[in-house]
Protein backbone atom coordinates (compact mmCIF):
# COMPACT_ATOMS: atom_id res chain seq x y z
CA UNK A 1 0.00 0.00 0.00
CA UNK A 2 1.13 3.52 -0.58
CA UNK A 3 0.18 6.31 1.81
CA UNK A 4 -2.44 7.06 4.39
CA UNK A 5 -5.89 8.25 3.39
CA UNK A 6 -4.93 11.64 4.82
CA UNK A 7 -2.04 11.91 2.38
CA UNK A 8 -4.26 10.83 -0.51
CA UNK A 9 -6.84 13.49 0.34
CA UNK A 10 -4.16 16.16 0.65
CA UNK A 11 -2.89 15.18 -2.81
CA UNK A 12 -6.40 15.34 -4.19
CA UNK A 13 -6.93 18.77 -2.66
CA UNK A 14 -3.73 20.06 -4.21
CA UNK A 15 -4.71 18.76 -7.63
CA UNK A 16 -8.18 20.31 -7.38
CA UNK A 17 -6.69 23.65 -6.37
CA UNK A 18 -4.31 23.72 -9.29
CA UNK A 19 -6.71 22.28 -11.86
CA UNK A 20 -7.99 25.73 -12.74
CA UNK A 21 -4.49 27.14 -13.21
CA UNK A 22 -3.31 25.71 -16.49
CA UNK A 23 0.04 27.47 -16.38
CA UNK A 24 0.76 26.32 -12.82
CA UNK A 25 -0.56 22.78 -12.90
CA UNK A 26 2.27 20.28 -13.50
CA UNK A 27 1.80 18.02 -16.50
CA UNK A 28 3.61 14.69 -17.00
CA UNK A 29 5.85 14.27 -20.01
CA UNK A 30 4.58 12.10 -22.84
CA UNK A 31 7.90 10.33 -23.04
CA UNK A 32 10.49 9.72 -20.38
CA UNK A 33 12.87 12.58 -19.65
CA UNK A 34 16.52 12.10 -18.88
CA UNK A 35 16.90 9.59 -16.01
CA UNK A 36 13.17 8.83 -15.94
CA UNK A 37 11.34 5.73 -17.13
CA UNK A 38 7.79 4.66 -17.92
CA UNK A 39 6.51 1.10 -17.95
CA UNK A 40 4.00 -0.09 -20.54
CA UNK A 41 0.66 -1.29 -19.19
CA UNK A 42 -2.37 -3.05 -20.61
CA UNK A 43 -5.47 -3.30 -18.41
CA UNK A 44 -8.39 -5.69 -18.54
CA UNK A 45 -12.04 -4.70 -18.30
CA UNK A 46 -13.11 -4.44 -14.63
CA UNK A 47 -15.02 -7.49 -13.48
CA UNK A 48 -16.93 -8.38 -10.33
CA UNK A 49 -16.77 -11.55 -8.32
CA UNK A 50 -18.69 -12.89 -5.31
CA UNK A 51 -16.86 -14.87 -2.66
CA UNK A 52 -17.98 -16.67 0.49
CA UNK A 53 -15.56 -15.57 3.19
CA UNK A 54 -14.48 -18.10 5.85
CA UNK A 55 -15.59 -16.92 9.28
CA UNK A 56 -18.70 -15.13 8.06
CA UNK A 57 -22.03 -16.25 9.53
CA UNK A 58 -23.37 -19.49 8.05
CA UNK A 59 -26.18 -17.82 6.12
CA UNK A 60 -24.29 -14.61 5.32
CA UNK A 61 -24.40 -13.64 1.64
CA UNK A 62 -21.24 -13.86 -0.43
CA UNK A 63 -19.24 -10.65 -0.47
CA UNK A 64 -18.82 -8.82 -3.75
CA UNK A 65 -15.49 -7.55 -5.10
CA UNK A 66 -14.25 -5.84 -8.27
CA UNK A 67 -10.92 -6.44 -9.98
CA UNK A 68 -8.82 -5.56 -13.00
CA UNK A 69 -5.71 -7.28 -14.28
CA UNK A 70 -2.72 -5.17 -15.28
CA UNK A 71 -0.11 -6.54 -17.66
CA UNK A 72 3.03 -4.49 -17.08
CA UNK A 73 6.04 -4.67 -19.39
CA UNK A 74 9.43 -3.06 -18.93
CA UNK A 75 10.54 -1.80 -22.35
CA UNK A 76 13.08 0.59 -20.86
CA UNK A 77 16.81 0.02 -21.10
CA UNK A 78 17.21 -1.07 -17.49
CA UNK A 79 15.69 -3.35 -14.87
CA UNK A 80 13.78 -1.06 -12.50
CA UNK A 81 12.35 -1.02 -8.99
CA UNK A 82 8.60 -1.61 -9.11
CA UNK A 83 6.23 -0.54 -6.32
CA UNK A 84 2.75 -0.39 -7.88
CA UNK A 85 -0.29 0.89 -6.02
CA UNK A 86 -3.82 1.78 -7.00
CA UNK A 87 -6.56 3.91 -5.47
CA UNK A 88 -10.21 3.81 -6.48
CA UNK A 89 -12.25 6.99 -6.11
CA UNK A 90 -16.03 7.02 -6.55
CA UNK A 91 -18.17 9.99 -7.54
CA UNK A 92 -19.58 9.77 -4.02
CA UNK A 93 -16.12 10.95 -2.88
CA UNK A 94 -14.91 7.75 -1.28
CA UNK A 95 -11.29 6.72 -1.84
CA UNK A 96 -10.25 3.10 -1.31
CA UNK A 97 -6.71 1.75 -1.74
CA UNK A 98 -6.68 -1.50 -3.71
CA UNK A 99 -6.35 -4.55 -1.49
CA UNK A 100 -7.98 -2.96 1.57
CA UNK A 101 -10.34 -5.47 3.24
CA UNK A 102 -9.57 -8.02 0.52
CA UNK A 103 -8.92 -11.49 1.91
CA UNK A 104 -6.46 -13.93 0.36
CA UNK A 105 -9.33 -16.28 -0.54
CA UNK A 106 -10.60 -13.62 -2.97
CA UNK A 107 -7.31 -13.54 -4.85
CA UNK A 108 -7.16 -17.33 -4.92
CA UNK A 109 -10.59 -17.49 -6.58
CA UNK A 110 -9.55 -14.91 -9.17
CA UNK A 111 -6.32 -16.81 -9.70
CA UNK A 112 -8.27 -20.01 -10.39
CA UNK A 113 -10.67 -18.30 -12.81
CA UNK A 114 -7.92 -16.50 -14.71
CA UNK A 115 -5.40 -19.36 -14.71
CA UNK A 116 -5.81 -20.25 -18.41
CA UNK A 117 -5.02 -16.71 -19.58
CA UNK A 118 -2.79 -15.49 -16.75
CA UNK A 119 -0.95 -18.54 -15.35
CA UNK A 120 1.55 -16.44 -13.35
CA UNK A 121 -0.80 -13.79 -12.04
CA UNK A 122 0.34 -11.93 -8.91
CA UNK A 123 -1.58 -9.87 -6.38
CA UNK A 124 -0.96 -6.15 -6.05
CA UNK A 125 1.11 -5.51 -2.96
CA UNK A 126 2.65 -8.98 -3.11
CA UNK A 127 4.20 -8.69 -6.57
CA UNK A 128 8.00 -8.79 -6.71
CA UNK A 129 9.45 -5.29 -6.38
CA UNK A 130 11.77 -5.59 -9.35
CA UNK A 131 10.68 -5.80 -12.98
CA UNK A 132 13.17 -7.00 -15.54
CA UNK A 133 13.40 -5.87 -19.14
CA UNK A 134 11.50 -7.41 -22.00
CA UNK A 135 8.20 -9.01 -22.89
CA UNK A 136 9.22 -12.34 -21.37
CA UNK A 137 9.43 -10.66 -17.95
CA UNK A 138 6.04 -8.93 -18.12
CA UNK A 139 3.94 -9.13 -14.94
CA UNK A 140 0.21 -9.86 -14.69
CA UNK A 141 -1.15 -8.24 -11.53
CA UNK A 142 -4.61 -8.53 -10.00
CA UNK A 143 -5.89 -5.27 -8.51
CA UNK A 144 -8.87 -5.90 -6.20
CA UNK A 145 -11.38 -3.78 -4.24
CA UNK A 146 -14.42 -4.62 -2.14
CA UNK A 147 -17.73 -3.51 -3.68
CA UNK A 148 -18.42 0.20 -3.36
CA UNK A 149 -21.44 2.43 -2.77
CA UNK A 150 -24.39 1.29 -4.87
CA UNK A 151 -25.15 4.95 -5.66
CA UNK A 152 -21.87 5.27 -7.53
CA UNK A 153 -22.23 6.14 -11.20
CA UNK A 154 -18.60 6.82 -12.07
CA UNK A 155 -15.21 5.78 -10.71
CA UNK A 156 -11.60 6.81 -11.22
CA UNK A 157 -8.67 4.44 -10.81
CA UNK A 158 -5.28 5.97 -10.06
CA UNK A 159 -2.44 3.54 -10.82
CA UNK A 160 0.99 4.56 -9.59
CA UNK A 161 4.43 2.97 -9.72
CA UNK A 162 4.45 2.79 -13.53
CA UNK A 163 6.90 5.71 -13.80
CA UNK A 164 9.58 7.29 -11.68
CA UNK A 165 8.79 10.78 -12.94
CA UNK A 166 8.02 13.16 -10.07
CA UNK A 167 7.54 16.87 -9.55
CA UNK A 168 7.56 19.10 -6.48
CA UNK A 169 5.02 21.90 -6.08
CA UNK A 170 4.14 24.32 -3.32
CA UNK A 171 1.09 23.51 -1.23
CA UNK A 172 -1.52 26.24 -1.81
CA UNK A 173 -2.53 26.37 1.87
CA UNK A 174 -0.17 24.52 4.24
CA UNK A 175 2.94 26.23 5.62
CA UNK A 176 6.10 24.84 7.21
CA UNK A 177 7.49 26.03 10.54
CA UNK A 178 9.23 28.93 8.77
CA UNK A 179 6.03 30.12 7.17
CA UNK A 180 6.96 28.91 3.71
CA UNK A 181 4.58 26.82 1.58
CA UNK A 182 5.01 23.12 2.27
CA UNK A 183 6.39 21.00 -0.53
CA UNK A 184 4.13 18.42 -2.14
CA UNK A 185 5.61 15.57 -4.16
CA UNK A 186 3.53 14.34 -7.10
CA UNK A 187 4.19 11.24 -9.17
CA UNK A 188 3.25 10.45 -12.75
CA UNK A 189 0.10 8.34 -12.40
CA UNK A 190 -2.26 6.58 -14.80
CA UNK A 191 -5.89 7.67 -14.38
CA UNK A 192 -8.65 5.42 -15.76
CA UNK A 193 -12.26 6.59 -15.80
CA UNK A 194 -15.31 4.30 -15.92
CA UNK A 195 -19.08 4.69 -15.84
CA UNK A 196 -21.20 2.09 -14.04
CA UNK A 197 -24.43 0.90 -15.61
CA UNK A 198 -27.23 -1.32 -14.41
CA UNK A 199 -29.90 -1.13 -11.72
CA UNK A 200 -28.32 -0.69 -8.29
CA UNK A 201 -30.92 -3.11 -6.90
CA UNK A 202 -29.41 -5.85 -9.08
CA UNK A 203 -25.75 -5.37 -8.32
CA UNK A 204 -24.71 -8.61 -9.99
CA UNK A 205 -25.77 -7.10 -13.34
CA UNK A 206 -23.65 -3.98 -12.94
CA UNK A 207 -21.16 -3.37 -15.74
CA UNK A 208 -18.39 -0.84 -16.21
CA UNK A 209 -17.97 1.21 -19.37
CA UNK A 210 -14.53 2.59 -20.15
CA UNK A 211 -14.54 6.39 -20.54
CA UNK A 212 -10.96 7.63 -20.76
CA UNK A 213 -7.30 7.17 -19.94
CA UNK A 214 -4.95 9.97 -18.88
CA UNK A 215 -1.51 10.44 -17.39
CA UNK A 216 -1.56 12.95 -14.54
CA UNK A 217 0.70 14.13 -11.74
CA UNK A 218 -0.80 13.06 -8.41
Image (spheres, helix red, strand yellow):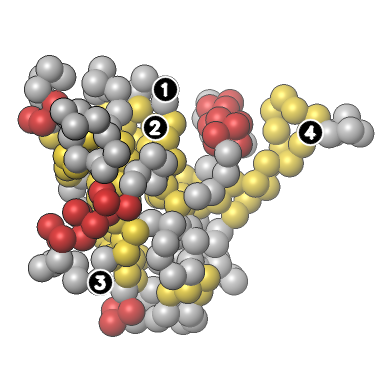
- Tell me if mark 2 has few (under 14), some (14-19) or many (20+) residues whose alpha carbon lies within 10 angstroms of its own: some
Q: Residue at x 18, y 48 (%)?
A: 45
* Location of residue 148 in the rendering, given as x and y in whole percent from the top left corner: 30, 28
Q: Which residue is mark 1?
A: 93
Q: Which residue is mark 4?
A: 181
Q: Nearer the viewer, mark 3 or mark 4?
A: 3
The label on residue 120 is: 3
Q: Is residue 123 above or below residue 130?
A: above
Label 3, label 4: how many angstroms apart (C-alpha)?
46 Å
* Location of residue 76 in the rendering, given as x and y in whole percent from the top left corner: 43, 76
65 lies left or right of 24: left
Mark closest to the chain's N terminus, 1 or 3:
1
48 lies left or right of 160: left
- Tell me if mark 4 has few (under 14), some (14-19) or many (20+) residues whose alpha carbon lies within 10 angstroms of its own: some
89 lies left or right of 36: left
- Residue toward you, 76 or 202: 202
- Residue toward you, 133 or 112: 112
Q: Which residue is mark 2?
A: 89
Mark closest to the chain's N terminus, 1 or 4:
1
Proximity of marks 1 and 2: CB atoms separated by less than 8 Å:
yes
Label 2, label 3: how many angstroms apart (C-alpha)?
28 Å
Label 2, label 4: how many angstroms apart (C-alpha)?
27 Å
- Tell me if mark 1 has few (under 14), some (14-19) or many (20+) residues whose alpha carbon lies within 10 angstroms of its own: few
Mark closest to the chain's N terminus, 2 or 4:
2
Q: Is residue 197 visible?
A: no
Amino acid sequence: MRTSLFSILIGAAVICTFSGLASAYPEPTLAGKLNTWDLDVVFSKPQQISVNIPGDAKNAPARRFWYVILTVTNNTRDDVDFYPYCDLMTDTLKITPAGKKVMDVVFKKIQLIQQPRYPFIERLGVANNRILQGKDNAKDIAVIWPDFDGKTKKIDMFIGGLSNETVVIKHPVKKDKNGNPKKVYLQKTLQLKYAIGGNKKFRSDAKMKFLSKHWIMR
